[in-house]
Amino acid sequence: MEDIIISVAQRTLIAGTPLLLGTIGEVICERSGILNLGVEGVMAVGAVTAFIVTFISGNPWFGLMAAIFAGALISSLHAFVSITLNASQVVSGLALTMLGLGISGLVGKPYIGKPLAQKMETWPIPLLADIPVVGPVLFNHSPYFYLAIALALIAWFILDYTRVGITIRSAGENPRATETQGINVYRIRYWCVIAGGALAGMAGAHLSTSYSKSWIEGMTGGRGWIVIALTIFALWNPLRAIIGAFLFGGIFVVQYLLQPLGISPNFLAMLPYLATLLVLFIGALRDSRKLNPPAMLAEPYRRGER
């Protein structure tokens, strides 16, 4: 029984890791006032880039770095369209999703069915990994898990307790007042969108070089849309994102646990997305003062207008 509990807990944390990485990036992006609905496409680009580079080089760390760069690069398109051109952030984000999925499907087609010779290995933390039950669950994971937790804590600290965080939040709350302080709102928003894309690319890299060791088209499986719902669930707080990401990771794992009970696999495949809709429904019912999204989220900012 203990082995089953440990296995389920481990798989829950593994499944929640890419969700956490993507959510941290989306929180940073949205706190600056930019809505990015292209997370799914960015994750797909990160996944295929990491797989191809790892497949060619044999080094998953090179794959991770390439995925971060690819995610940042493709997200800069959304930044340009949304910030410089002041186009609809919703339309731009949806276009980014379609573009990313299309690029990943095209570029990754020759690699379908080819396994990696080397994937990102687990890093057991000395001494801590030997603690009964807790050790195998929390301290025997790939570097992606440790990075996700560390980045969530760093993002929370920066956003809440540093001057940089105040600047990011003010850009999302009142960009005109921010500009009067001599701060370039456009630059802040660009960096936040690019950082969010880099983290989404990292989330995709986890899927193709750690969660599995193969590439298949559509392997993101709607996780990018779940990330957007988790951002709302977390109330734009990276610490709450940790809870939400691993909660949804558990829902992914439950699918496989319930299969032997004869429950329809089609219904089980719906569970993460039903949970996503439930989160959005609960969010819609909340008092808007408690929900408290960034005041200028998805609103274009034109310098000099009153």
Image (spheres, grey):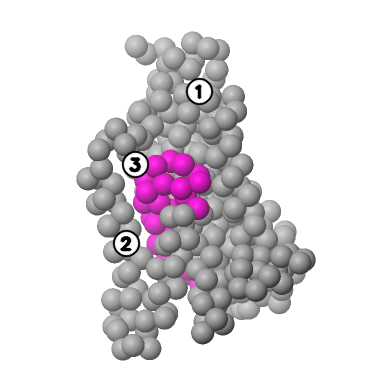
Circle 3 crowding by C-alpha within 10 Å: few under 14, some 14–19, many from 20: some
User: Is 191 within the magenta?
Assistant: no
- Residue 183 occupies which quadrant of the picture? top right
Q: Which mark's residue is nearer the viewer, 2 or 1?
A: 2
Q: Which mark's residue is nearer the viewer, 1 or 3?
A: 1
Which residue type carries mark 2?
A: Ala
Q: Residue at x 63, y 49 (%)?
A: 150
Q: Which numbered disc flags the more N-terminal residue, 2 or 1?
A: 1
Give the residue pinned by disc 3: 90
SS at mark 3? helix
Q: Residue at x 61, y 42 (%)?
A: 154
Rendered image: mark on residue 275 = 2
Residue that protrudes farthest toward the front in the picture: 132
Residue 210 position, x and y percent, is 62, 68
Give the residue pinned by disc 1: 185
Q: Nearer the viewer, residue 192 or 11?
A: 11
- Magenta segment range? 215-242
